[in-house]
Amino acid sequence: MIHYALGPRFLAAVFDTEAALDGWLASVPHERRASLRTGRDERDLPTFLVESNGFVWCDGSELGERLLAWSDPAKPDDWVLGNVFFLAKPWSPPRPGTDYMGVLPHVHVHQEDVERLRREGVDAFLESWLSPTSLARLRSRAGR
């Protein structure tokens, strides 16, 4: 199970235990802590955080279906349909309570990515942006 903190528009931290999240929250300055909300999800790390009109956790088996639902050929080619972040292990930024999501492995999903996913499958999509180390972690968890 993952335990996380979200800011108004960013992932603030993710941990694999509630105690670790609570310890991290204690380090967040009070003025920043007030804007955070915490939660938990039944998934384990490694996992994905999908951002499009909010955040949703999903595993590799759910990712393809979720992204295919984003397909919108009417959008311009350079339109970002959403973002996918990969979290291999517990993570928190160097300055607690701030937005450092850009350092996480992620991809800005465009229509061409959705079309590639449709043609070649989830593995090809993941191989286009995840490192070999991240892919190995993900595959070992999935038993592949």
Image (cartoon, rainbow, N blue to C red):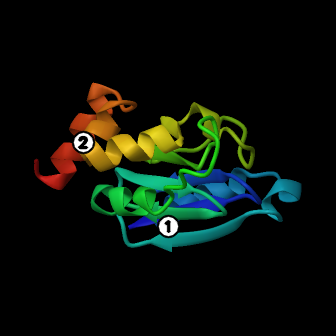
Q: Amino acid at mark 2?
A: Glu
Location of residue 94 in the rendering, given as x and y in whole percent from the top left corner: 66, 35
Location of residue 136 in the rendering, given as x and y in whole percent from the top left corner: 22, 36
Q: Is residue 109 left or right of residue 47?
A: right
Location of residue 11 in the rendering, given as x and y in whole percent from the top left corner: 63, 53
Q: Amino acid at mark 1?
A: Glu
Quadrant in which the N terminus is drawn: bottom left
Q: Residue furthest left?
A: 144
CA distance separating discs 2 and 1: 38 Å
Question: Could you tell me if residue 86 is visible in this image?
Answer: yes
Residue 43, compared with residue 32, is above or below; it is below
| The quadrant where residue 128 appears | top left
Please give the residue where the numbered disc 1 appears in the rendered image: 18
Of circles 2 and 1, the one toward us is 2
At 46% from the left and 63% from the top, the residue drawn is 69
Please give the residue where the numbered disc 2 appears in the rendered image: 120
Taking depth in this image into account, of 60 and 14 the one nearest to the observer is 60
